[in-house]
Image (cartoon, rainbow, N blue to C red):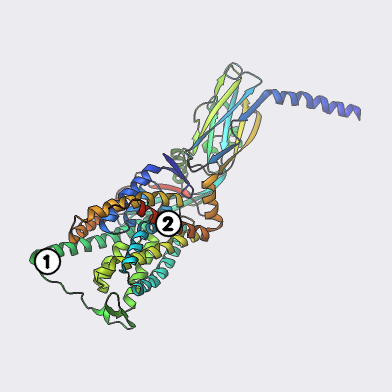
Amino acid sequence: MIRAALLVLVLLLPAGSRAEEALISRLSDRRVEITTAFTGAAILVFGTTGAPLGPASGHDVLIRVEGPPQPMVVRRRVRVAGLWVPGPTATFPEVPSFYALAGTRPHWEVLSEGERAAARLGLINLPMRAVGEQAPVFRAALLTLKQEAGLWVEQPEPVSVDGGRLFSARIPLPSTVAPGEYRVSVLLVAEGRVLEWQEHGLSVLRVGTAATIAGLARNWPLLYGLVSVLLAAAAGWLGSILFRRG
Amino acid sequence: MQVYLPIAEMSVDALLLLGIGFGVGWLSGLFGVGGGFLLTPVLMLIGIPSAVAVASGANQTIGASVSGLISNLRRGTVDLKMGLVLLAGGFAGSAIGVQVFALLRRTGAVDVVVALFYVLVLGVVGLLMVRESVQAILRRRRAQPRRLHEHFWAHGLPLKTRFRKSRLYISVIPPLGIGFFIGFLSAIMGVGGGFMLVPAMIYLLGMPTATVIGTSLFQVVFVAANVTVLQAWANGTVDAVLTLLLVAGGVAGAQFGSAFGTRLRGEETRALLGALVLAVAAALLWDLVRVPDNPFAIGRAPA
């Protein structure tokens, strides 16, 4: 019995201490607040590693940020009688609303294709099961348009390394980010394998007036409609008194 | 100065919205219309989702028209009986319009259908306005008197009733129908419909010009209020922050516009308004006809 417990301890201890040293990572913020003055934000992901990073040791860090899943629809306009009208659509029931990937080196250089697919690293490995139109052009359009909107980003800027061990990366969130729970994953990679994998939660929340308005609109839509009517009427009436000429 | 629109879920320059509100308000003060037909397309142009643009456009119309309604009520230039008949039709039309709008959103056809409605309605109304005002200008030159109003088949319908303030004895069916039609378009296009209602009241109902503006404002304010509440309820697309910025710019612009408008003659103002309406229709038609930069568009799938 005592022998067994010692064996477990011996097996656990080095592994535990190695894990603590191998990778320590943190986020600058646990929450991002969307106020009425929100114009986008940036989160800083930083940490240190046990082994020095870089080509000498072959250790690399990858950082992945994933937003809450969102159903997206891709529409194609087709020409009918000289007019461009909406044609076939493809619905992607569960794609991340936001996705960013950064690394000390490009992810395709540090991990094999199979490893990247398993860890959902890289835009081509996002789960893009489509309902409706199946043509690959719809997937391509989703990829392009999400990237143009700054909501799907590969290598926003490489993870920078100071003194061989301190790494940091800035992940920009545009003003159109969806509120919800985000997951930030930090991976330590060497010799084509993932050595360490740490996860952090990040909440993107509407707060203040923006939250009140959105909450009212969602939970009491009828009341919100009436309030909107009264506000617009009051503003119009007040404004005409303020700006009256002559 | 950027401001985050909580319903559109995007950040827009507040000064840009105030400026748009001012510009549209100036034109609406000049022409005596709400200006929704200009505002909603401009909002779509700067990237506001069309569903939010339409619903908030209707909401903005209230702010743009309410002070005009109050001053007309004070002056006693609102035919309340006619207004209520128009409104009865308008409520029914806008209630159906909002449901149709929700259906279009689900099928994803909303952008194109809204644009097509704009092209058709603005095209027809613009042409009629230009034609009528040019004729009026020519008639003024020839100094021909005009009859009070024309009588045609619509006046022969049953359910005749007396509208004292407008000095009319006509069937309630034409005003009910006009109210319904404008209410429907108001829900689909996010406009108050003043630019269609005023000519319809003059030429179809034969109302005297003294009561036309006040009565149309009465219908526009209450139909826009109905559309706002129903859009908020059925589609959740009314953005109060967007509306308030537009109203703030709009009421300032309207005062300057109406001061400028006193320098123009009625027919010339109508001809200019007709030309403006046609220009908006042409711009939207061009957008439907030209080869799009990217034939694909993405959006959040309705749950």
Q: Which labelled disc corresponds to residue B94?
A: none
Which chain's residue wears label 2? A
Which residue is at the far left? B142
Q: Is residue A202 left or right of residue B76?
A: right
Q: Nearer the viewer, residue B153 or B203?
A: B203
Q: Which labelled disc corresponds to residue B139?
A: 1
- Does residue B303 appear in the picture of this structure? no
Q: Is residue B221 left or right of residue B232?
A: left
Q: Amino acid at mark 1?
A: Arg
Q: Is residue A179 left or right of residue B193?
A: right
Q: What kind of element bears circle 1?
A: helix
Which chain's residue wears label 1? B
At 22% from the left and 64% from the top, the residue drawn is B128
Q: Nearer the viewer, residue B281 or B88?
A: B88
Q: Position of residue B48 (x, y in %)?
A: 41, 48
Q: CA distance from mark 2 to mark 1?
A: 43 Å
At 66% from the left and 25% from the top, the residue drawn is A23
Image: B173 above or below A82? below
Q: Residues within 10 Å of mark 2 (few under 14, many from 20)?
A: some
Q: Amino acid at mark 2?
A: Ala
Nearer mark to the viewer, of 2 and 1: 2
Q: Is residue B167 left or right of residue B229?
A: left
Mark count: 2
- Does residue B142 appear in the picture of this structure? yes
Q: What kind of element bears circle 2?
A: helix
Q: Quadrant of the N terminus of chain B?
A: top left
- Residue identified by numbered label 2: A234
Q: Nearer the viewer, residue B229 or B282?
A: B229
Q: Residues within 10 Å of mark 1 (few under 14, many from 20)?
A: few
Residue B143 lies in quadrant: bottom left
